[in-house]
Image (tube, helix red, strand yellow):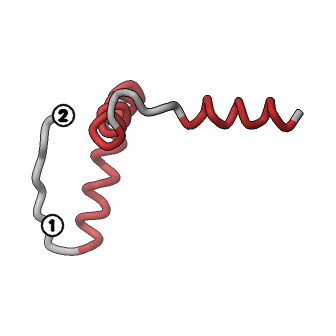
Amino acid sequence: MERIVHIAKSHKEARDWDIEQVISMTPEKRMAIAKELKVRVFGKSAKDVRESHRLQMKDES
C-alpha cells in the first residue's frame, strides 16, 4: 500500500481530498486495501465475520 501525505489548510479541504481519494479508487482496489488492513490488524488466521454470522443464523433456525 502506497502511503500518500496531504497537508490540508482546512477541515473542508481535508474532507474533500479524502472523498476524492476514495472516489478515484476502483472497487477492487478498495477491497484489496480493506483485506490488507484486516490482515495487518487481525492476522491471517482471523475468522471472517460474515461466516460466523451465517453460523449463528443456522443455530437459531
**Which residue is outermost to the bottom?**
10
> Taking 3 as reference, is 6 above or below it?
below
Identified by mark 2, the residue type is Met
Front residue of 4/49: it is: 49
Rendered residue at 12%/57% (across/down): 6
In percent of width and height, residue 58 lies at 80, 30
Q: Quadrant of the N terminus?
A: top left
> Taking 6 as reference, is 30 above or below it?
above
| The disc label shown at residue 8, or none | 1
Q: Specify whether 27 is left or right of 2.
A: right
Rendered residue at 73%/37% (across/down): 56
Residue count near mark 1 (Cα–Cα under 10 Å), binned few <14, some 14–19, many ≥20: few
Front residue of 52/5: it is: 52
In percent of width and height, residue 33 lies at 31, 34
Front residue of 45/19: it is: 45
| The disc label shown at residue 20, or none | none
Residue 25 lies in what quarter of the image?
Answer: top left
Rendered residue at 10%/53% (across/down): 5
Give SS at disc 1. loop
Which mark sits nearer the N-terminus, 1 or 2? 2
Disc 1 and disc 2 in contact, CB within 8 angstroms: no
Identified by mark 1, the residue type is Ala
Rendered residue at 67%/37% (across/down): 53
Mark 1 vs mark 2: give the one in front.
2
**Where does label 2 land, which residue?**
1
Front residue of 21/54: it is: 54
